[in-house]
Image (tube, rainbow, N blue to C red):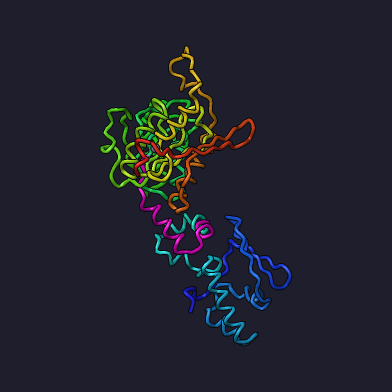
């Protein structure tokens, strides 16, 4: 007896037949293709899987038409198709145990998870993990803002937003949440973002912190104990610096940290996921770059604060944030991140440049994990 009572061949999967005994199942969202060589009577029976007939009745029909052996093969095929997420119960979303709002709003995402992970149980478990997670985001600039917006789209609902800066006119054109009034009134970025999020996502639980991240900051007072992942897009005084501070704290707490954004060079960048004990930490990255750039001697620049004039596009911030959101989702789907690395989308060449960074065996921060 199969758990799928009335088997339904999902709409997200195309089926092609080559010859009479070769059938291809193509997952539209992931491009995964499963090829089976089976008897033509079994291929012909795929049209029966419309979710309206009881599994036992379908197997009996196969026995009546093609004999006992075909019936056994059909049952085996159904088990296999169920195991691969090709055949499901037609009302699997309604039976998921997720609240109605989540089912209604995340239907397409849940189908994508099903393509990706194989079974309704796994897809539902990831969505539930997302709903229960709490995220802290340092920095609500263009990349941080778009990243939080996309995480809300994925179904994350609990956030702590940290930024000491106020919205300025040049932020409005590049940001997911700010409008001209926020700039005129010089509203704090975390506060302005929280207000817009609460309007758009009424079930969101948003806390804010408007203190600046400094060497004096007691991170265990800022980062609550129930946080699932820390995000850093804080570029003041510099993204590399704030990342080292946060990474040391996160490594000691075994908390994942995602570093995205920052000014100039980091726009259009693929940031890095730091998983204590698995990937390089921010100190490993800093060490890597100080070795790689040891012959580069910076000349003192006549302009002290160059942040305001650094170039960037709204689209590059969105790109960076999109890549970051997908990396964070991979953590929740257990696709995992086992390697360290960075990348940049080079607009003028329309090319993605990436490279990997190794974990340092002698790193004082992360090597003993
Ligand atoms: Zn390290």
Query: What is the span of residues highlighted in magenta in the rendered image?
Result: 112-136
Q: Residue at x 62, y 73 (%)?
A: 46
**Res. 220 visible in picture:** yes
Residue occupying the point 44% across, 49% down: 331
Q: Is residue 79 above or below residue 184?
A: below
Q: Say how many tags the image has.
A: 0
Return the x and y of residue 315 as percentages of the image width and height: 55, 35
Q: Residue furthest right?
A: 19
User: What is the x, y in percent for residue 214?
Assistant: 32, 28
Q: Quadrant of residue 15?
A: bottom right
Give 177 or 151, whichever is nearer the viewer: 151
The image position of residue 226, as x and y in percent, is: 30, 47
Taking the image in four quarters, ligand 1 sits in the one at: top left
Picture residue at 43% right of the left edge, 51% below the top: 332
Pick the front one: 321 or 155: 321
Instruction: Tell whether position 121 is magenta.
Output: yes
- Which residue: 35% across, 44% down? 369
Q: Nearer the viewer, residue 180 or 316?
A: 316
């Amino acid at each position: 007896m199969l758990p799928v009572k009335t088997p339904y061949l999902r709409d997200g999967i195309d089926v092609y037949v080559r010859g009479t005994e070769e059938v291809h199942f193509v997952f539209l969202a992931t491009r995964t293709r499963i090829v089976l060589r089976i008897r033509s009577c079994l291929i012909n029976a795929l049209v029966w899987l419309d979710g309206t007939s009881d599994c036992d009745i379908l197997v009996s029909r196969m026995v009546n038409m093609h004999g006992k052996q075909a019936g056994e093969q059909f049952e085996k095929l159904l088990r296999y198709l169920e195991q691969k997420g090709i055949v499901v119960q037609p009302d699997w979303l309604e039976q998921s145990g997720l609240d109605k709002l989540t089912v209604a709003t995340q239907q397409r995402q849940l189908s994508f998870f099903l393509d990706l992970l194989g079974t309704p149980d796994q897809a539902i478990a990831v969505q539930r993990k997302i709903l229960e997670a709490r995220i802290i985001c340092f920095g609500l600039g263009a990349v941080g803002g778009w990243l939080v917006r996309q995480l809300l789209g994925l179904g994350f609902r609990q956030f702590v937003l940290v930024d000491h800066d106020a919205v300025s006119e040049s932020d409005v054109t590049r940001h997911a949440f700010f409008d001209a009034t926020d700039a005129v009134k010089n509203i704090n970025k975390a506060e302005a973002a929280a207000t817009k999020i609460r309007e758009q996502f009424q079930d969101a639980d948003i806390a804010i912190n408007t203190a600046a991240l400094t060497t004096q900051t007691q991170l265990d007072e800022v980062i609550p104990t129930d946080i699932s992942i820390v995000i850093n897009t804080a570029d003041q005084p510099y993204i590399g610096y704030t990342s080292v501070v946060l990474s040391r704290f996160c490594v000691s707490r075994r908390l994942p940290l995602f570093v995205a954004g920052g000014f100039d060079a980091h726009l259009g960048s693929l940031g890095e996921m730091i998983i204590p004990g698995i990937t390089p930490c921010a100190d490993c990255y800093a060490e890597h770059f100080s070795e790689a750039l040891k012959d580069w001697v910076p000349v003192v620049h006549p302009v002290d604060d160059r942040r305001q004039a650094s170039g960037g596009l709204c689209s590059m911030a969105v790109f960076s944030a999109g890549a970051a959101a997908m990396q964070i989702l991979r953590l929740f789907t257990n696709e995992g991140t086992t390697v360290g690395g960075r990348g940049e989308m080079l607009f003028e060449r329309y090319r993605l440049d990436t490279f990997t960074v190794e974990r340092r065996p002698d790193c004082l921060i992360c090597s003993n994990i």
